[in-house]
Image (spheres, helix red, strand yellow):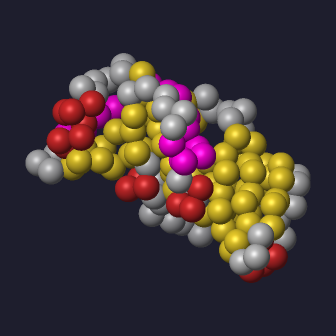
Amino acid sequence: MTLSIRNQLPGTVTEVRPGGVMATVKVRLDGGQDLTSAITLDAVEQLGLAPGTAVRALVKSTEVSIATSRDEGLSIRNQFPGAVTHLELGTVMATVKVTMAGGELTAAITKDAAADLGLFVGSDVIALIKATEVALATV
């Protein structure tokens, strides 16, 4: 299956924590970072997720935010340090490619946000992804 989702990060499930309707799934990415996904219990069962399951974490580029420094006062579980390796400024939107340990993330942010953050190729940044915006696929 080919997908239009740019961010497809390979990893292995390390923990599944079920709740009433949803579950949090911890994934160790191939680059060594830990990622959290919040998905339905039905999805956990349908995918057969358990520790050791190989998965791809799927995140649309519009769901990746960029910060110029780490902020511990956020509810966002997934915070990946990296560096801007490509910056494309459009009329309204910007595409930011961030290289991090073990891979790359693409973020689609407004051109104004890119300017306000002072982004440039080589900028040290943190890519932020809410756990509820991470889909999982088995491989």
Identify whether 31 is placed above or below 74: above
Q: Position of residue 28 (x, y in %)?
A: 75, 43
Residue 125 vs residue 136: left or right?
left
The reply to whether the magenta stretch includes residue 81 is yes
From the viewer's perspective, is residue 14 above or below residue 47? above
Residue 110 or residue 84, whichever sits in front: 110
Q: Is residue 53 visible?
A: no
Q: Residue 127 location in percent, x, y?
A: 47, 38
Which region shows up in magenta?
74-89
Of the 4 image quadrants, the one containing the N terminus is: bottom right
Location of residue 131 by image quarter: bottom right
Q: Number of callouts in the render?
A: 0
Q: Is residue 129 magenta?
A: no
Magenta residues, dominant SS class: strand
Residue shown at 54%/66% (left/top)? Answer: 2
Q: Residue 73, can we see it? A: yes
Q: Position of residue 65 (x, y in %)?
A: 40, 45
What residue sits 51% from the left and 37% below the top? 73
Residue drawn at the location 51% of the way across and 65% of the way down = 3
